[in-house]
Image: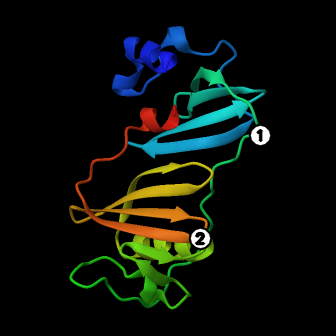
Amino acid sequence: MFILALLAAGGVLAGCSLQPSQLTEDGPPTDGVVVREAWTNRTLYRQIVRDGSAYVVNVEEQSSIFLRYVSGEPKPVMQRIAAAPAVRFGKLEGTEIVDPASLDIGIRKSIPYTYEALPDQAFVYLETLLQDGWEITSYYSDASFIDYYLKKDEIFLRVLIFEKNLKVLYPIQGKQHDPWTFISD
């Protein structure tokens, strides 16, 4: 908590840019385990753990700051799996949103907004949305999930992919997570 207060005082939280006085001396770490990732406004941030230390890296600026010391084995972020979009699909009733259960690849509705789906099935759904004209505006990931924000014709949607399920949240207002708050947690 002290580090966040220190960073906020230095103006880092306002624009999510790393100030020269806070940069690591050796430049950003290029190896280590990526444990969190946030992409928004065309900027990619990563939290990387190397040798018991966590760093926040702004990939575009090639800058980083030391975040904190960590213990235990770091778990790498969930990765997007290459997938082909479905050829045929239906829409969720009363919306222009692709119905995940309509893809005929084994995705089953579980509870409202939630579907039983393995990651390979969930990424077919994501690719189908993209093929249908949706655009990813940001994403946030760690070892247990990837949270995508998508937009099409001023409609906003969130797709959360977990190890055993998929959540499709709509309608949302379009307000996205602050990448700095997410990446530095």
User: Which residue occupies 39% across, 69% down?
Assistant: 168
In the image, residue 165 above or below residue 140: below
User: Which residue occupies 66% across, 12% down?
Assistant: 25
Left or right, residue 185 beside residue 88: right
In the image, residue 156 above or below residue 84: above
The residue tagged 1 is: 73
| Residue 9 x %, y % | 38, 12
| Image quadrant where residue 171 sits | bottom left
Q: Earlier in the sequence, mark 1 or mark 2?
A: 1
Residue extending farthest front: 111
In the image, residue 66 above or below residue 123: above
Q: Could you tell me which secondary element the residue under label 1 belongs to? A: loop
> Badge 1 local density, few (<14 within 10 Å), some, or many (20+)?
few
> Badge 2 local density, few (<14 within 10 Å), some, or many (20+)?
few
User: Which residue occupies 53% across, 76% down?
Assistant: 124
| Residue 92 x %, y % | 30, 82
Name the amino acid, label 1.
Answer: Glu
- Numbered tag placed on residue 52 in the rendering: none
Left or right, residue 82 beside residue 124: right
| Residue 61 x %, y % | 52, 28
Left or right, residue 52 beside residue 48: right
| Residue 69 x %, y % | 68, 23
The residue tagged 2 is: 164
